Amino acid sequence: MRNRLFSLFLAVLLVVGALTTTTGVASSAATPATYGPFDPRIELDGHWGRDDDVAITVNSGSSVRLRFTGSHLGALFNTASITVPAQLYVAIDGGTPALHKVDADHLAFADDLDPTVAHTAEILVKDVDEYENRWNVPLETGVVLKKVELGPDAKLIPLPTTAEHRIEFYGDSITQGVMALCAELGTDCADGTKAYPHLVGEAFGADTNQVGFGKQGILQPGHGNVGTAADSFGWDLAGFPAGNFDPGAVVVNFGTNDAAYSSAEFVPAYLAYLREIRTADPNALIVALRPFNGTHADDIKTAVAAAKDRRIVYVDTTGWLGPDDFNGSTHPNVQGHQIAAAKLTAVLKHLTGWSTGPIGIPKLAPAGATCSDTPLSLTFQGPVRLGVAGKMQIRQADGEVVDTIDLADLTSYQRTVGDARTDYDQVHTWTYQAVVVDGRTVTIYPHQRLAGGQVYSVTVDPGFVVGNPGASWQFRTQRDPKTDAHLTVGAHGDFCTVQAAIDFVAPGHKSTIDVAPGTYRELIWVPPTKPGITISGAGAGRTVIGYPNNNLLNGDSAMANVPMEQSYCQRRVIPQSDRFNCWRSAMAVFADDFTMTDVTVQNLTPYRGSQAEAFFGNGSRMVLARVRILGYQDSLRLQGQAFVTNSYVEGDVDFVWGTGGVFIQDSELKALHEGYYNQVRNIDNGPGNIFVRVRLTRGPDAPDDSVYLARAELSRFPTSQVVFIDSAMDSQVAKTGWQITSPNDCAAAGQIRFWEYHSTDLAGHPLDTTVRLACSRQLGDAEAAQLRDPSFVFAGWHPVVPRSER
């Protein structure tokens, strides 16, 4: 979320001159824990380019937000080429923000925090110098963030916050906040947090991209090697394409620096720029501001009219600012930015119907009778954010507390799921998102299911939600179902969550669980003690199970220092490699004879957010039919025996993988980026991954010749088997088809089984496979006929696919 607390603090501090400047000092932490800035538990707002795991911004107003434990907070930067350091504000636990210059590779922001509670930090880019090179690497100014640094044994805590609205601002030095604090050029007087874009974003509780470059115009190139508005649009900096932001509104404030250009030059260029924005953001409201000094005002009106787009609006700013609202003749001062922000906020409220608060009295849920596994929610009238501390408690009728979620307590962000046990039969504990903010709604996920047929009361402390004086209410849980043979999940079902229905099934009992349309944000675990469960959705487009679980949150990275008794996975096919990686999927099935139909399973971890399976099946005789499996790296992992039909899987790196044997037919596999469709890790000469009549498609970010059918590591898995039969593929598939490593030498690949039969393009025309990897081969008719038969691959097992009846 946009960092709304800064405006209040900085407004006071600027008046009294209380900001202090500190430079980099050594951390007192002996062995600090470091986290990459793209860790999914860290929130980045604004334009941040990604160079491997390094975050780069050249824009004032960009920010970093995190919740963590420990006594120390610092950061590691790359300042090797920096000549004019950027400036940051850092506020911890809502305290007074401190001003820091990024003039060293290591900065310590705090060393004496209370190590027994969780903390919240907000790091905001005050200014990036407008004159030095800020566009071409190596940069002379900007923020190159390598790591966030915490104390020894400190942890990041999930901080899931989704703003209700997104606003993008494009402009010049005014948008950047140049001379906002005083009437001199340079970083000391510039402050993007005091500029009107930041203030408007705070008013709406919006995520914002604040993109301002000094001297830039529609036709005028900017300072710092930045090109024109059209040249820089769609880029974080040179060579770093901007990600998809999908704003609800885009505000354009150009023209001030284009005074030297004629109307005949300016109008078509401005119109082309508006159309470029419309192409990128087809659903956004586009607001074209009259520059505050009026330059090219009539020309902007003309261009907006020529666009013939009802969602492109000209806003006349005449009279918004007076002589006392500027530092110099062009740049608004703090007061001027506040006035402009108030005026623009009112305009956007009128055009969009968005609310700016106050947050008001929340609607509390559940009310009346509800599921025993219900989440709790508070829905406010305006945008909200979580406080630094505060508790939510659930009490049973006699007053005994049965569950507590404390924002400042690390253990509140941990829970068990599905009686999952380690290889040492100890109950495993996950890190999870106990509280989620989505626009105006705060959703709280209790640690366990409550007892059925009971009355419970809820109390929420003042300050749990900023600006809320607290809340209390009661609800009653419905009675448990009488049988576990057939269960329902949904708002009017036996349970509200899929996991609660699975938990209710007695060990060894077969059960069918019907899941109603809806989105179910939860971790799923089916233990080995519960074979024979069938999960049936209402259609893959209607029933969606999703969670942002991943390697950093619960996988190898998170478990590396946890005792093996508490962390080692059960059913490890490859004992060393599989020690911890069972805990990182959105949905994991460790039971035999499992069936799932007509459901979407999605890992909500963002792109390049670490390894993160959507579905992990580790059992015998598993069937997936008419499902959608969505993720990026490692989306679908299967080992044991798994049959997949009439389904869709998307991802980029090894997004179908496991140890075999797997049979996938009549399905689509979509590559979202360059990478690998498949990696199989056969440890014997058994069946691997067999694909029959699949379509290998791609997203717009997967270029030609960039995605391999499969890869294998010969030194560890020399007998790996991947087979494509009667399959169609687009030109994103690498011409060589396959990849081997360790070594990359077909002379060492005598046992590899990379096979194809009758591959075609998507139109059905035969492919030229003559340049395929030399140690792959094309199958004969008889071989292909055998491998088309699942019962042959599975040594006698005949998968049964339930019909869709909903």
Image: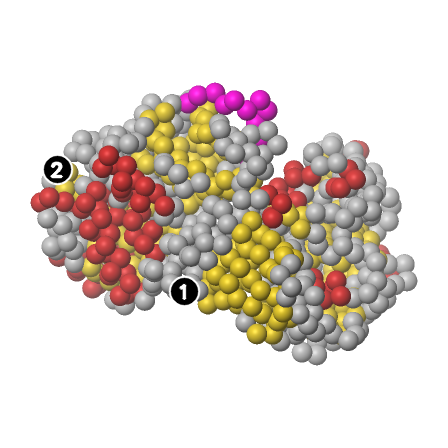
**x then y, percent, for residue 550:** 63, 47
Image mark for residue 328: 2
Amino acid carrying label 2: it is Gly
Separation (CA) of disc 2 from disc 1: 44 Å
Q: Could you tell me if residue 236 is visible in this image?
A: no
| Magenta segment boundaries in residue numbering | 24-35
Q: Is residue 457 above or below residue 767?
A: below
In the rendered image, which quarter contains the C terminus? bottom right
Query: Which of label 2 and label 1 is nearer to you?
Result: 1
Q: Main secondary structure of the magenta part?
A: loop
User: Measuring 53% from the left and 52% from the top, which residue is drawn there?
Assistant: 391
What colour-coding does the image apply? Answer: secondary structure
Image mark for residue 299: none
Amino acid carrying label 1: it is Ile
User: Measuring 54% from the left and 71% from the top, which residue is drawn there?
Assistant: 367
10 Å crowding of disc 2: few (<14), some (14-19), many (20+) = some
Q: Could you tell me if residue 139 is visible in this image?
A: yes
